Amino acid sequence: MLAVVGPTAGGKSELSLRLADRFDAEILSVDSMQVYRGMDVGTAKPGWEERQQVPHHMLDLVEPEEEYSVATFQRRGRAVIEAVHARGRNVLVVGGSGLHFRALLDPLEFPGHDPTVRRTVEALEPDVARAELLAADPGAGDHVDLENPRRVARALEVVRIGGGTPSERAGSPAAVAVREYRPLIPFTGVVIDPGDGLGTRARRRIDKMLKRGLVAEVERLAPRLGRTASQAVGYKELLPVVEGRLPLSAGAADVLTATLALARRQRTFFGRDPRLHPIPWVSVVDQRLAAVEEAFGA
RNA sequence: AGGGGUGUAGCUCCAAUUGGUAGAGCAACGGACUCCAAAUCCGUAGGUUGUGGGUUCGAGUCCCGCCACCCCUG
């Protein structure tokens, strides 16, 4: 099992094709937004030619109005791994969605989800929800960010559906393994470090997307973007533009800002994973390829 | 030229009790992360309040000059 992860605009896709070839692998994308059909330009989704060259998995799984949960991603992704291995080929995990990456390879255990309970819990005032969570588990603060309404709501949802309290769940062997970065599925992985040129590359990447028709794509998808899809970088910021409430130049600037902020979060998420070998971004693809191959022990 | 208005952090701001030595949102920077995760949250830094004087124990807040921009009249 091989993995190439890292921030957006790090040149992962172009590397992955060559690596897949080199290691006789199929590509498994860990990307929370490329699972939505039709979101192609804005997510820099691999195109037809790339998919002809190397089989890509976990792309175009649902319509944009739907929501594709991480738990579902985990289940399906693991099935993909089994299937590819059964074929006698390797799996190359590629992407930038940290939680999806860990859900796939680490023993993350997602308790159930109940839409009705979720809705009820989300409707609670944040301090009410927090109080109920603390009443059920006085030590919840050690495992859940009590300042984060979403985390509190999710923790409370799990408690209400009988999935256990945060303290109980944190004590399981699997939870310990997750904290210690002991994978369920062993892998060799690298994280691309975008370096100082990220701003420039992100700028160019956005320009390219605009030339390829990102605005038209957003306009077409606008009425169909669901709760999650509508938050994707590039779509969220361009929505006001296609609605005529913001000039394109301002929208494009917002996309750049959001892209860089996303890249920063991705860097911190992957950066603390001790299993990932950092690969500095260099302009020459062959050099990057060589560095990754070396990390993969080829 | 005359009359009026505005000038507070990179940006936005009818924040700043009766004058008591500056705040917020966003951006920036750092961090967290067991299913809204391209999401959400936490923390840090940043201003000689356009400028020069004056009044005052003390001025972003009052007075005068100057500068910049905006509006109106010629």
Image (cartoon, coloured by chain):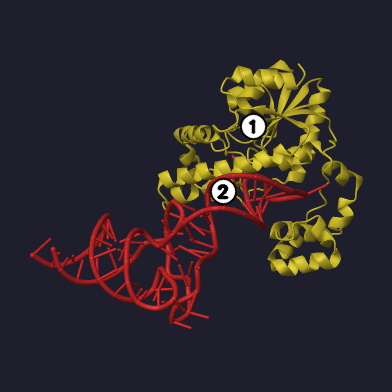
Chain colours: A yellow, B red
> Mark 1 vs mark 2: which is more N-terminal?
1
Q: Secondary structure at mark 1?
A: strand
User: Which one is nearer the viewer's eye here, A153 or B68?
Assistant: B68
Which amino acid is tagged 2? Arg
Q: Is residue A223 above or below residue A42?
A: below
Q: Quadrant of residue B6?
A: bottom left
Residue sitting at 82 percent across and 24 percent down? Answer: A85
Q: Quadrant of residue A186?
A: top right
**Image check: A1 left or right of A16?**
right
Q: Which residue is mark 1?
A: A193
Tell me if I can see residue A120 in this picture. Answer: yes
Q: Residue A41: x percent and y percent?
A: 54, 35
Residue sitting at 52 percent across and 32 percent down? Answer: A201
Tell me if I can see residue A62 in this picture. Answer: no
Q: Is residue A74 above or below residue A169?
A: above
Q: Quadrant of residue B38?
A: top right
Which quadrant of the rendered structure holds the N terminus of chain A?
Answer: top right
Which amino acid is tagged 1? Asp
**Alpha carbon separation for disc pair 1 and 2:** 34 Å
Q: Is residue B3 above or below residue A9?
A: below
Q: Which residue is mark 2?
A: A224
